[in-house]
Image: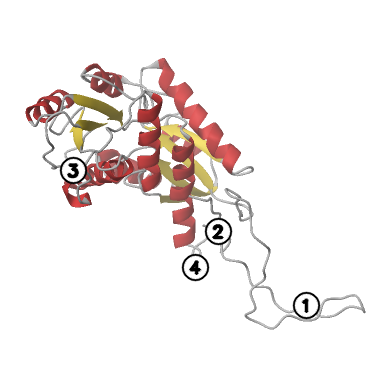
Amino acid sequence: MTAPTAQQPPAAATGPAARPPRPRGTAVSRGARPAGAVARAPHAPTLVAVAHGSRDPRALRSVHALLARVRALRPGLPVRLGHIELNRPLLAGTLDGLRGDTVLVPLLFGHGHHVTHDLPAALAAAPHLTGRIAEPLGPHPLLAEALHGRLTEAGFTPEAGQSRPAPQEACHHRPTPGHTAVILAAAGSRAPRSAAGTAAVAELLSARLGGVPVLPAYASAARPTVAEAVRALTARGHHRIAVASCFTAPGRFAAQCAADAPGTAAAPLGDHPALARLVLHRYDQVLLARSASGPYGTGAATVAV
């Protein structure tokens, strides 16, 4: 999607070569932008990517690689990183060092406790900032694209001739024996809204896979676990089961879920290009929502999704 073209007031003619005045309300055509091109408002709010944090040394490298892709997609946009725990910089320290307008983009996939409580508390503790919190990364088709990409990289392909159920049946389809299935491994939360979001991601992924059943499973706080999901799918006649890793970076939960996979286990999403585009999309949604009257101005940036 592209930013709406700004309207300009008519300019007074200053000489023979001056352009004629343009009537009010006439949109300015700037031509088509190439795919992925962006329009950016001056003094754009700082994008603060909020990662959970992990003791796994690969996690920080993975998040930095993702943010490098984000910066490459939006040159000049101020992008910072803050962690909820376990890694530096911690979110509180990142916010302490900022001034002005800020958009927090959680590198998390649902409306769990971190998104609904920890992030608002962090902004409340930084009254020197004008801050907004973007939606978590799921559910969204770009997330399904990234999950599909990582499954493909791991060698997974849907079975030929796989029947395609209606979207609402994707997670509960009863296949004939021998069909493929996928487990969507996520962190887990006690919040019902978070579980509903994970189920929606499973439906989107199932659609991308041509109707392969996708069953959500969790590393913590919710059921089923990956091991329980494997047993349930096996009982339904599935003997080719892959695990899609709905985690931003390597860590304890991702490793735990991969260890319980009976076959293919995809890598965490990391710096997948679709995830970088999704981070910017969530940021842009905040700007567009405030474009009419908020402090962020009317020139909200956009990225092709």
10 Å neighbourhood of mark 2: few (<14), some, or many (≥20)?
some
Q: Residue 293 carries which label?
A: 4
Q: Mark 3 points at which residue?
A: 191
The image shows residue 123 at horizontal and vertical percentages of 40, 45
Q: Residue at point 47% right, 31% down? A: 271
Q: What's under tag 1, amino acid-wise?
A: Ala
Q: Earlier in the sequence, mark 4 or mark 1?
A: 1
| Mark before the other along the chain sequence, 1 or 3 | 1
Q: Name the residue under label 2.
A: 2
Q: Position of residue 96 (x, y in %)?
A: 49, 38
Eye-nearest disc, 4 or 1: 1
**What's the amino acid at mark 3?**
Ala
The local secondary structure at tag 1 comes to: loop
- Look at discs 2 and 1 and give the one toward the viewer: 2
Q: Distance between the residues labelled 4 and 1?
A: 25 Å
Amino acid carrying mark 4 in the image: Ser
Decide: is 204 above or below 52: below
CB atoms at circles 4 and 1 under 8 Å apart? no
Helix, strand or loop at label 2? It is: loop
